[in-house]
Amino acid sequence: MGEFFQNVSRYPRYLISFTLGVFFVFFNWIKPLFKNPVSAIAVVGIGIGTFSLLYFTLKAMLGLSAV
């Protein structure tokens, strides 16, 4: 039983490592786009738009606002 809990305790560390790895790869993929001002504005706009869509969708789905 102790071995089971030892294995379960490794999952949070794996989740953090996996998440940081995904963000690192994504950032390295996006980084060259910031060299050109037009593409940098587009990337920032898409990021803000994606965050806004996610925010308002979750807010409406969870019933946190009167829609």
Image (cartoon, rainbow, N blue to C red):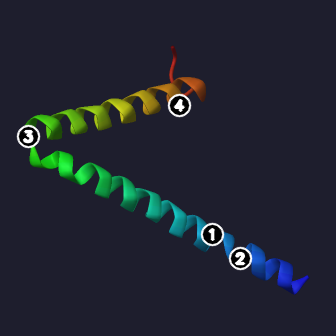
Between residue 57 and residue 30, name the one nearer to us. Answer: 30
Residue 47: horizontal and vertical position, in percent?
A: 31, 38
Residue 4: horizontal and vertical position, in percent?
A: 85, 78
Q: Earlier in the sequence, mark 4 or mark 1?
A: 1
CA distance separating discs 4 and 3: 32 Å
Residue ID for mark 1: 12
Query: Three-letter amino acid code at disc 3?
Result: Pro
Mark 4 residue crowding within 10 angstroms, few (<14) / some (14–19) / many (20+):
few
Mark 4 or 1, closer to the camera? 1
Residue at the outermost bottom position: 2
Q: Which mark is residue 37?
A: 3
Q: Secondary structure at mark 3?
A: helix
Query: Three-letter amino acid code at disc 1?
Result: Pro
Q: Which mark is residue 9?
A: 2
Q: Earlier in the sequence, mark 3 or mark 1?
A: 1
CA distance separating discs 4 and 1: 25 Å
Mark 4 or 3, closer to the camera? 3
CA distance separating discs 3 and 2: 45 Å
Mark 3 or 1, closer to the camera? 3
